[in-house]
Image (spheres, rainbow, N blue to C red):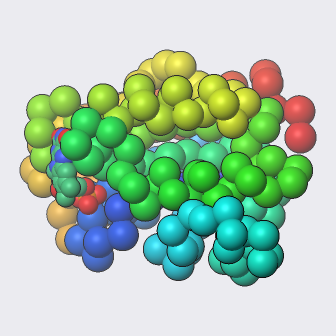
Amino acid sequence: TPLNVVTLCGSLRRGSYNAAIARTLPELAPEGMRITALEGLGEFPLYDADLQAEGFPAAVTAMGEAVRAADGVIFVTPEYNYSVPGVLKNGIDWLSRLSPPPFAGKPVAIQSASMGVLGGSRAQYHLRQTLVFLDALALNKPEVFVGAAQTKVTDGRLTEAGTREFIGTQLKAFAEFIARVGGK
Ligand code: FNR
C-alpha cells in the first residue's frame, strides 16, 4: 500500500501560495507516496478549555483521526509576523489535546512560502519548537523555504521548475525518513 501522507496548510485564503504548493505536491511525490490535503482548520473554534470540557468539536476529532491514520504529515504554511499563523497554531493546540495525541511519534515535514526573500524560515523554526512538545519526529533536511512565491505560482499551482524539483527532493527524503522512523 502507498504511504499515506497528509498536508496541513496554515493559510485559509483562496489565492494562498502555500495552498497552491500543497495542491501541487501529489505531482511531485515519489512513487509509492499518496498525498492528500486535510481541510477544516478554519472550522475549529478558538481554543478554549471550557469548550473542550463540553466535548471536542467534530472537525477536531475528524482531523485527529486523519492525522493518526497518516504515515506522515507535511505542514505548508505562511509566516505571520515572524511566526506561525494563528489558524495553524490554534489547530495544533486543539489537536494536541486529543487522546491519544495524534502527533506523538509522527513523522512530519515542513514547507513554507512567503512573498519575501526568506520564504517563511522564521515561522518554520517556531513550528519546530512546538513540534518538540508534540513529540513529533521532524525531518531536518532538506529545508524548503519558498521565497518570492508570487513569482513561482501560476493559476493556483506551483509552476517554477527549480522549486518543483527541490520539493521533490524533500519528498523523497521524507519517504526515506518515514521508512526509517515511522513505526505506525
Ligand atoms: C504577512 N506576511 C509575512 N511575510 C513574511 O515573509 N514574514 C512575515 O512575518 C509576514 N507577516 C505577515 C503577517 C500577516 C498578518 C500577513 C497577512 C502577512 C506576508 C505573507 O508572506 C503573504 O501574505 C503570503 O502570501 C501569505 O501566504 P499565503 O496566504 O499566500 O499562503
Tell me which residue sits at (55%, 34%) in the image. Answer: 130
Would residue 135 be found to the left or right of residue 161 on screen?
A: right
Residue 124 found in image quarter? top left
Location of the C terminus (image quadrant): top right
- Work out whether residue 92 or residue 171 is closer to the camera in this orientation and state it: 92
Where residue 91 sits in the image (x, y, percent)?
56, 59
Residue 67 showing in the rendered view: no
Residue 88 showing in the rendered view: yes
Where residue 36 sits in the image (x, y, percent)?
60, 63
Tell me which residue sits at (77%, 50%) in the image. Answer: 102
Tell me which residue sits at (22%, 43%) in the image. Answer: 81
* Residue at the front extreme, as displayed: 50
Looking at the rendered structure, the number of numbered marks drawn on it comes to 0
- Work out whether residue 169 or residue 15 is closer to the camera in this orientation and state it: 15
Where residue 93 sits in the image (x, y, percent)?
60, 52
Where residue 101 sits in the image (x, y, percent)?
80, 47
Tell me which residue sits at (33%, 39%) in the image. Answer: 83
- Work out whether residue 148 or residue 102 is closer to the camera in this orientation and state it: 102
Would residue 103 be found to the left or right of residue 150 on screen?
A: right
Query: Above or below — where is 110 with respect to 152?
Result: above
